Image: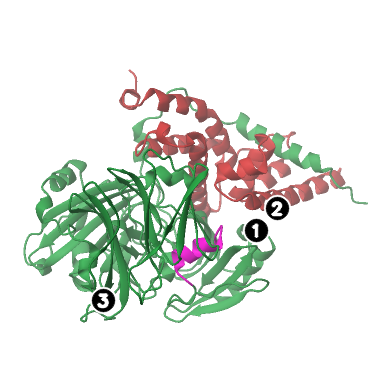
Chain colours: A green, B red
Amino acid sequence: MTMSMPTDDVAVAFRRTYQVIVDQTELPSGQLPAYGLTQRPRSPRHGWVFAGAAVAVALGFVGVALIRDDVPPAQSEVVDRIALVEVPSELGGQPTVVNSSVTSDGFDPVPPIDMWYWESGEEAWVVLLEAQADADLTTVLGPADDGNGLTAPTAGEVSSFSLPDTGWLGRSWLDGSDWRIAVGYDESAVTAIVEAATTGDPSEADVSGFDLVYEGPQFIYPPADVELSELFYTSPTGGFSVALFKGWEHATTAAVLRSPNAELTEVNGMEAVITGNAVNWWIGWQIDDSSTALVESSDFGPDTLRAIAEGIQPVSSDDWESLAGSASPATTINSRPTAESFDTIRQPTVLASGDDWAIKSQAVTTPEDSAEPGKLGLCGWVEIEGQLSIDFGCSIEEPGQRLPVRVSTPDGPVVTGELRIEVAEVRFEGASLTVPVTQIHPDIPYGWFAIQLPPGTALTEYTFWSSEGIQLPIDPGTGDQLTGTVHSIN
Amino acid sequence: MQPYARLLSGLGVDDADIWLKCKDDLARYAAVLIGPGDAEDVVSTVFLRVLDRRRLNELEDARRYLFRAVLNECKTRGSRNRAASGLVDLPAPQPPDPQPEILEAVLSLPMGQRAATFFVYWSDMSVAEAAEMMGVRPGTVKRYLHLARNKLKGVLDDHVNAD
């Protein structure tokens, strides 16, 4: 005869067990820990790590990296700053730093997506994404079947899809209103993951030949504690930027899904990924155990970018500051909005303005000499005292990709963004404001909005509702951390 | 000689107060997630990483933020440990209470399940509160609790039957 334990006994067992563990814990002293702890070189990990995605926020693009960091390893020392040290001949001479920036605190207003990642061998892997709301994955992946190969899940069944450019297999389904997506190269593994996720805990999936190597939050943008440092260079043959995302190592599956043309390559023996779109090329790699380096240019192609990346090395903070301090803002290469990289077809529309500041949007088309000429898009940016302050970048035939952000202006906070809806409603501190979304071009079924909030408004909560009742949740915890950042996944 | 003078001198009174209030709870949490041996290092690493980029008193809820950061750090280390050796830092069983098989069963739970059971059963939080601390949905915590309870209940049943 089998006896069943009373329910409370289970809780008691947990409590007793944790008490034993806690009793064995050497609690930290009252003193604060030394700095040196964080400088301790970490042991290299093994196997493939789905790592190194990067969003060059200021320039409006997403890069990805599927990096194997066991052979060869990322640099063992923690990298604090990077710069171009060895100048490739393709640049036609010594480049000059024309601008610099350091940004931190809150790149990501989107809640992290839960991710499980299994790997087998060198290239076979499976990923499960769990979004907290359907809008989350829609926001980061783009609408289903909008060039990303994604299939919108339907209630009551698991939908299959494939990504022909990558060879990936995918499944999507709904858990209540939440999206679940599993993708990978191995059909039996994907099937096992789906089975585990739909019946129990994905962590306990029995996936033959695969090891679970990561479970946890997966940020589509760098999480709030990542610091981005960038140097913007100009050379006789063109401009480029060198960025370091310090403390951000995990790539976003969403970014990979959005970059079907991404190709693996190498930078100084380290695995890297290179990809591009109609305007930009970028190359990213994991430069140490927890940071991602990124080189981006709209002037150079993949070969030159790869050559530049080979010349990127860690530098001391003092050296970096010296380079940053040598910049001449009057000739910055990012003094013009990204919109001017395209063919502009209309004058900019002023969405909101005040004393020496304005938020603008403009319709553009991709240039005739681009890979995909003649495509419509929308751009947005902020000008303060006539100078470009924040560049939101441009979305080309990818509606609603500019997430709402909060911008500080001399006249108080403004929430602005691009939405494929008719009305934006911001709710804050028990009140709400509603404004129409301005359609910038008659052939583009989405537009920009800007809502000026009362000065001093603390955005403890703000939520956007579309005319179709679709909610775009914003992490309230980052409401005060969005100033000056750009969110774009073009 | 005060080895922490550099950090102390640059730390605001509020941040130091937050640290002192949270450090023990964070260490216990980290111990449950990854083992007592690494708990202090996890907490120190998290604290310094956060402090390197922001003031704690600027955070809306520094305590919650730090708990989430500890969970993420433990998950990262746990994954690395698992990938490297298949082992996570486990405390030595301390019979007779709890039984080694119970301790082993608890420590074999995925980290999310351990975090959920720690908050609900050891810290006496509600499901909603645990979800807030972990940065997940309440439904996720419920699922973690359900799965963790099922696993431990099976071990307890086996233990009773064996007796």
List the single residue furthest toward the top: B1
On screen, residue B48 versus residue A484, left or right, reads right
Using the numbered discs, state the Cα–Cα distance from disc 2 to disc 1 in whole angstroms.
Answer: 7 Å
Which is in the foreground here, disc 1 or disc 3?
3
Using the numbered discs, state the Cα–Cα distance from disc 1 to disc 3 in whole angstroms.
Answer: 45 Å
- Circle 1: element type: loop
Q: Amino acid at mark 2?
A: Leu
Front-most of residues A18 and A343: A343
How packed mark 3 is, by other alpha carbons closer than 10 Å (few <14, some 14-19, many 20 or more), is many
From this view, report whether residue A244 is shown above or below residue A120: above
Looking at the rendering, the stretch of residues picked out in magenta corresponds to: A130-143
User: In the rendered view of the protein, which quadrant contains the N terminus of chain B?
Assistant: top left
Q: Are marks 2 and 3 in contact (CB under 8 Å)?
A: no
Which is in the foreground here, disc 2 or disc 3?
3
The picture places residue A186, in percent across and down from the top left corner, at 54, 75
Disc 2 target residue: B147
The picture places residue A169, in percent across and down from the top left corner, at 52, 76
Which chain does tag 1 point to? A
Tell whether position A141 is magenta.
yes
Front-most of residues B61 and A259: B61
Q: Amino acid at mark 1?
A: Asp
Q: Amino acid at mark 3?
A: Thr
From this view, report whether residue B86 is shown above or below residue A92: above
From this view, report whether residue B114 is shown above or below residue A212: above
Which chain does tag 3 point to? A
Disc 1 target residue: A201
The picture places residue A25, in percent across and down from the top left corner, at 57, 31
Visible residue check, residue A39: yes
